[in-house]
Image (cartoon, rainbow, N blue to C red):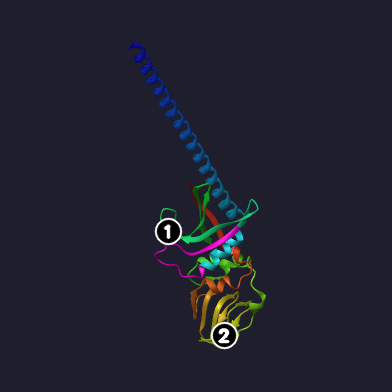
Amino acid sequence: MRKGFVTIYVLLILLFLSISLAFVSRQVQSKNDISKDLLTKKQAVYEAESRVNIFVNDFENEIKEYILEDYKRIIDEGLSDVDHANAKEFYIDYNNLNKKIMLMRVIDSNIAPRKDRVYRVFEHIYYKNVTAEANIYLRARENILLSREEILRYEDVEDELSKFEFKEDKTIRNEIPNTSKENPYKGVIILDRDTTIDKDLYIEGILIAKKRIDTKGKKIRVKGLAAIEQNKGNIEYAKDFGPIIDNILNKNDLIELEILASHSF
C-alpha cells in the first residue's frame, strides 16, 4: 500500500514538473516571438522612415514641380488627411530596388491652418508579416509674386522679379501685341520705357511695366501677374497661378518647403 502511494506521489511530481517545464517553455517561446515581432516592427518602421527621408532630401525639385502643378488645380473643400486628392506616385532607388512613395495635398487642422498648403509624403510597407507607416508633412511657402492678390508696385518687387528667368519664346519687350478678350496674349510683356496704350490689351501671363503707362482710356486686363510703376489706373487684374508658373523657367524658386511634422508607426 505504502509502495503504491509513493509511486503515485512520484508520478504526480513528474506530471507537475512536466507541466511546469512546458509552461516555462511556452513563456520563453512567447517572449522570443514578441522580441522578434518588436525587432521586425522596428526594422519595418526604419525602412519606411528611410524611404520618406530619402525622397524629401533627394527629390526637392520633383516635390516643387508637383506643388506648382497643384497650385493650378481646384482642391476639394472636403479634402482631409484621409480623403486626399491629386495623390501622385513617385519611385526611389532603395537598396537597388524601386520603391513607391506617395505625395499628396492634405488638409489637417492638427498640422497647420486650413489656409496653408500642406503636403504629405507617405510610405506604407509590409515587412515580414508586419506593417509600418511613415509620414512627413511639408508646408509650401509662396514667393511674394504668387502670394499677393492685388497688382504689385514694380519698385516694391524689383529685387524679387530680377531673380526669375522668363521664357524667351514667350517674352516680348516694349511691344503691345494685337489681342482680344477671346485671344489674349499668353506670355510675358516687359515695358522698359514710358508706354502709351492705343488699343485694349488682354494678357494671360505677366505684365511688367517699369515706367509709366498711359492707357488713353483703353482697357488693360491681366490674368496672372501685374507689376507696374504707377497706380492701377485702368488695369483690371486677377491673380492666376497658371499663367505665372507657365512663363517662368526657374519656377521652382517660387516655392520654399518647410517640414512641419513627421511621425511613423
- The residue nearer to you, when weighing 136 against 265, is 265
- Is any atom of residue 44 visible in this view? yes
Quarter of the rendering occupied by the N terminus: top left
Front residue of this view, candidates 6 and 76: 6
- Classify 53 as above or below 228: above
What residue is disc 2 on?
A: 197
Q: Which residues are magenta?
A: 71-91
| Amino acid identity at mark 2 | Ile
Residue 262, position as x, y percentages in the image: 50, 50
- Which amino acid does the dot numbered 1 rest on? Val
Q: Main secondary structure of the magenta part?
A: loop
In this picture, is 6 found above or below 245? above
Name the element at disc 2: loop
Measured as percent of width and height from the top left, residue 149 is found at 48, 69
Question: Which element is circle 1 on?
Answer: loop
Q: Which mark is residue 11?
A: none
Q: Quadrant of residue 188?
A: bottom right
**Mark nearer the N terminus (1 vs 2):** 1
Residue 226 appears in view: no
Q: Residues within 10 Å of mark 1 (few under 14, many from 20)?
A: few
Residue 114 found in image quarter:
bottom left
In magenta segment, residue 74: yes
Residue 82's label in the rendered image is 1
